[in-house]
Each structure stands twice: as structure tokens, then as C-alpha cells.
Amino acid sequence: MIDLRSDTVTRPTAGMRAAMAAAEVGDDVYGEDPAISAFEARVAALLGHEAGLFCATGSLANLLGVWLLVRPGQELLCESRAHVARAEMGAHAALHGVTTRTWRHRAGGVDLAAITELAAPDAGPYLVSTAAVAVENTHNFGGGSIIPKQDLAALAEFTRAAGIGLHLDGARLWHAQVATGVLAREFAELCDTVSVCFSKGLGAPVGSMLVSSAANIARARVQRKRLGGGWRQAGILAAAADYALTHHVDRLATDHVAARQLAATIAEVAPAAIDPETVQTNIVVLDTGSRPASEIVGAARDRGVALSAVGAHAVRVVTHLDVSADECAAAGEILAAIMREHAH
Ligand SMILES: *Cc1c(COP(=O)(O)O)cnc(C)c1O
């Protein structure tokens, strides 16, 4: 099976496992895990923030980042297909009393006019007050699309002037860095709170980081424990993530090329399904037209390619560390054949 469902399906490499075995660890709830403390400092510095909090998942890092900015009963603005709104089991509402309103952007990007229209920072006694905006770079369900630095800068200028927070879900911020040459720090510095993942394209088995000010991270550390997310000798996991950050960022360019080529192969026979020019990183979202996404996923599985349905008529293909260029090319041919057959 060529597994292109997600870049989370990777397994730790031999070098990563060796780094995990060699990690010096301690009890992190006591602040005594040297591997975690060093890694939190490394990532915070890399992203231009004062402090970091190593978390089990990106969802937890997002949950804490938004919690720092939005009080119960206030609202968060985000794009309609944002991970925080769609793929975190309603945690921000269920656990933290956050309400959400959304704008719609073709690729999941920033629509400053729409955000300006939606934002109501001090709405008074009748309407819900907006406390923060969240953006996603790259955008998962938007097809791995990049928010350009100037768009994020314009949004940051707006949120600062409006006195509201700005959270960046940077699960795949590394991909934006590699694809644009703009450093992850240049995006992250514009935002109040930032989450990044090591368990996606970077190939670590577990691990995400929230970065922000030292005061914010101290508060988030307490809330993480309250939610049951404190952990002990997790330096073994920080070592894997640290290894991933050192060794697996530059190679993301390979995944981007493979994704673009796969999209081009499909577009040759099914141009309505995908415009290869819109594929900027490692995610390809195919429009299945009149066919249900589940039908395409099933047909691909029968021929040895695993995909995921991300909408009624949207199928996602994700390239990553554990699939070779040849496997991606083979998958492209198989998917092109399926899209051709299903077009009739
Ligand atoms: C995967 C992902 C996350 C975090 O997911 P977890 O499975 O909780 O680690 C957050 N945001 C985006 C955009 C993602 O793709």
C-alpha cells in the first residue's frame, strides 16, 4: 500500500531512534527533563519567541494557544475549514467556552476585508466580542497552501490595532519556509501564539510546540497540567522531535516536488480535478466532481493507494518522508486512471 492519507503515518528512522535512546531525561512536571527544556528553548529561539511548551499533539498546542488569547464566551475568527474549527473535536468550545465565526477563502488564506467586517473587539452587552484571529500556514484542507508573509503582516497590523490576539496554527510552517525561503521565524514573530508540529512532515512519532511570551507559556504550562497533559520523562520524544528538526526540514522540498508532479499527472486526464499550479507544498486536494469522495478513496484503495476524503467531493493526497518519488509517481498514474474512468 502506498499510504498518502497523511504525513502523520511516518515511522521513526534509525537515526531518530538512536537519538531517542541516547536522550537524557527527567521528570518534566518538575521541570527536570533536560532534553525537553533544551528543545523548548531551541524552538522558541528559532521562532523568535521567549518560551516554548512541548505538547503531545498539535491540537493541544492550539487549544492552549487560543486559550491564552480568548476568554470563555468570547469569539475566535478563523477560516471555515481551519483545523481549529473542524478537526479538534470542538475542544475550544467544549473545554474553554470559545465561540467561533469564520470567513471563507478558496485556499484557506487571509481575507482581510472579511476579517475586518467580522471583527467586533468590544461588542458591548448585545453581541459577542472578538478576542482573537487564528490562521493556518500552510493550510491543510485548503490544499497545503501558503499564506504569504505580506498577508500575515497586514493581518497582524490589523489585530494589533484592534487590540485582539493572533494565533498561528503552524503545524506545517516548516513547509511554508522551505517552499518560500521565508524563515519560519518571520511568520511566527508576527503572531502572539504559534503552534508547530514535528509529527507531520518532519517525521517524529509524537510532538508539537507552543511558543509565546514567557508569561504566556508559564500560564499555558499550568493549563496543560489541568487538562491532563503534563508528562514525565518525555525527553525521549523531545529527542525525536529535535532530531526531526535538525535532519528533516530541508528534505521537505522533495515532498513538494513529488506532490506537484502527482497533481500534474492527474491534471493531464482530469484538469477539473486539480490545477497543479495551486500545489505549493506536500498536499494535493482533488475535486472529485460529481463522484463522491468515498468512491474515489475506495477505488484507489483497491489498487494499492491510500487517500483520505476531506469533504463530500474532496480527496486529499499527502506526500511525506516514508514514500519515495517512484511511489508517488506510481500513485499519480493510478489516480489519473481512476479519475479518467470515473469521469465517464
Ligand atoms: C495535524 C494538524 C494539527 C494537529 O493535529 P494533532 O493530530 O492534534 O497533532 C493542527 N493543525 C493542522 C493544520 C494540522 O494539520
Image (spheres, rainbow, N blue to C red):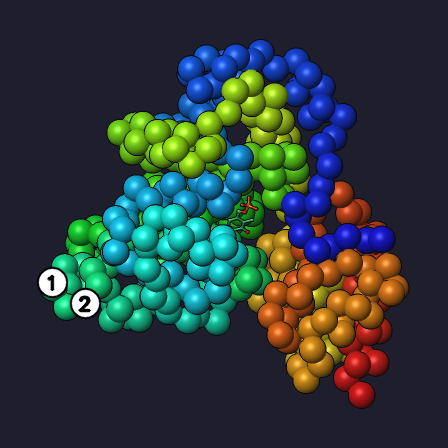
Q: Which residue is mark 1?
A: 124
Residue at (80%, 88%) from the top-left corner?
Answer: 344
In the picture shown, does residue 331 fall above or below 113?
above
Q: Residues within 10 Å of mark 2 (few under 14, many from 20)?
A: few
Do the CB atoms of the residues marked 2 and 1 lie less than 8 Å apart? yes
Q: Position of residue 278 (x, y in %)?
A: 58, 66
Question: In this orientation, does residue 191 appear?
Answer: no
The quarter of the picture where residue 246 lies is: top right
Please indicate whether residue 234 sits to the left or right of residue 340 in the image.
Answer: left
Pointer 2 residue Cβ closer than 8 Å to ligand 1: no
SS for callout 1? loop
Residue 242, label in figure: none
Q: Position of residue 313 (x, y in %)?
A: 64, 75
Q: Which residue is mark 2?
A: 127
Question: In this orientation, does residue 212 appear?
Answer: yes
Residue at (33%, 44%) from the top-left corner?
Answer: 67
